[in-house]
Amino acid sequence: MTESPEERLATVAVELATAAAPDAEVDASADRNRLALTRFANSVIHQNVAEDVTTVRLRLHREGRTATGSATVVDEAGVPALVERVLDAVRVAPLDPGWPGLAPIAAPAPTAPLDPATAAATPADRAQVVRAFVDAAGGLETAGYVRTNHWTGGFVSSAGQVVTGEAAECGMSAIARHEGADGVARHAPGRWAELDGAALGAGAAAKARASADPVELPAGRYEVVLEPSAVMDVLQALAYAGCNGKAWNERRSFVRLGEDQLDPAITIVDDPLSAGYGYDRDGTPHQRLVLFDRGTSVAVTHDRRSAAEAGTESTGHANDAAFSFGPTASHLTLLPSGADSAAAGSGADGPFADASVAELVAGVKRGVLVSDLWYTRLLDPRSLVLTGLTRNGIWLIEDGQLAGAVRNFRFTQSYAQALMPGNVKGVGRTATPIPGDTYAATSPLWTCPALHLASWNFTGGASG
């Protein structure tokens, strides 16, 4: 097999480092990201940016000390300076008693095939999606972005591990505005052909129009239906603060492995393979990992460092921030209640994200429908309590029907308690993949159905 440019860069880094320090353990990765972003506001594209960046990261462990460094390069000529810098750093680095050693040789599992249309998407292609969104909004003011990224990578270590990979992703997040009220639509499908700007625009406009003349409801606990964009925030908190192996080792996580902590309707899986990513920053192969199986906590995410501390094996979740922040899942799916998890479309009649949201609303005697959560902040990791705001559409539900728009709430809620046994009254039949980050080269992906929950603690209005 022909050596890829990224593999070659990683190989050069390892060869130079081991030549200078034969007694060191060394690994290197090279990642090329072709990220493009088309942004629009006031229904007009105002920014189209693209970058083609290759980054080499080198890690070196020698005489009980570990140092890492990275550099943006255009060719092999940029690698020696990086190697020299890391060699200098490791001489003065503190002792690292938690060093787990390099990853053993292992072949990555098969990944989802690359979508050539996503990898080759042009500014004109993205503009067509924006045009469709704006037209479908029916004259409402619109704003948002369309992004694509094409990643190729290579990893090499002095232990003999060599892996390469390629993936592409696309996504849109945008709003339509009507009389000061916003409606949001988000979608990050696996294929460019499935990014439907017209459906997204129609859905966002329907939400905005349905948000006119909101009323203020008193604070308190309400039965809620969370749309997929709101559920995304729940999955993020579970990934970063709940199922993080470093947090679990340090007893900062609510997770108690083997216990029935969540409702039996909740099964959560991390699957980077489905997005095309086959290995982590340690060079460990990715895997499909079940974190909660029908409510039972069965796993947390580990890199080699946290796994060694826990006395277990890495789950393939090393990342650039793993040393300080910990290994985290970034491709979580909350399995829908239907027979499969095919992504839902992004628009249906009325302000619903998809038909399964309407089905959940029909089962609510009195409660609220929440489109989106934002500005959320973790208050207590041990109980996974967060505070934040609703936005982009919230409606009162009475007798299974929407009874009018509601002003935004503040909330303080344990996400773990929200999903506890007996509090989950329904899970949507379909799941929508939601983009996680506008600017990150490799964006997290959260695949979310809607949720019907028996109780959510709203502590006041957004204005005070």
Image (cartoon, rainbow, N blue to C red):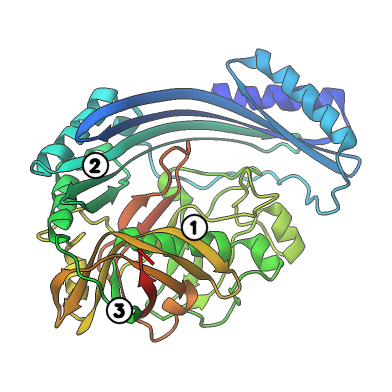
Is residue 1 among what the camera can see? no
Q: Nearer the viewer, residue 79 or 177?
A: 177
Q: Nearer the viewer, residue 229 or 13?
A: 229
On residue 195, the disc is 2
Q: Which residue is mark 3?
A: 218
Is residue 368 among what the camera can see? yes
Q: Which marked residue is nearer to the observer: mark 1 or mark 2?
A: 2
Badge 1: residue crowd in 10 Å (few <14, some 14–19, many ≥20)? some
Quick one: SS at disc 1?
loop
On screen, residue 207 versus residue 319, left or right, reads left
Q: Residue 49 at x, y = what percent?
A: 38, 25
On screen, residue 51 versus residue 61, left or right, reads left
On screen, residue 65 versus residue 393, left or right, reads right
Distance from label 2 to label 3 (Cα)? Answer: 39 Å
- Residue 119 picture quarter: top left
Q: Residue at image x 57%, y 55%?
A: 328
User: Which comes before the other along the chain, label 1 or label 2?
Assistant: 2
Q: Residue at image x 34%, y 35%?
A: 147
Distance from label 1 to label 3 (Cα)? Answer: 43 Å
Q: Which marked residue is nearer to the observer: mark 2 or mark 3?
A: 3
Q: Which residue is mark 1?
A: 288
Q: Residue 8 at x, y = what percent?
A: 62, 22
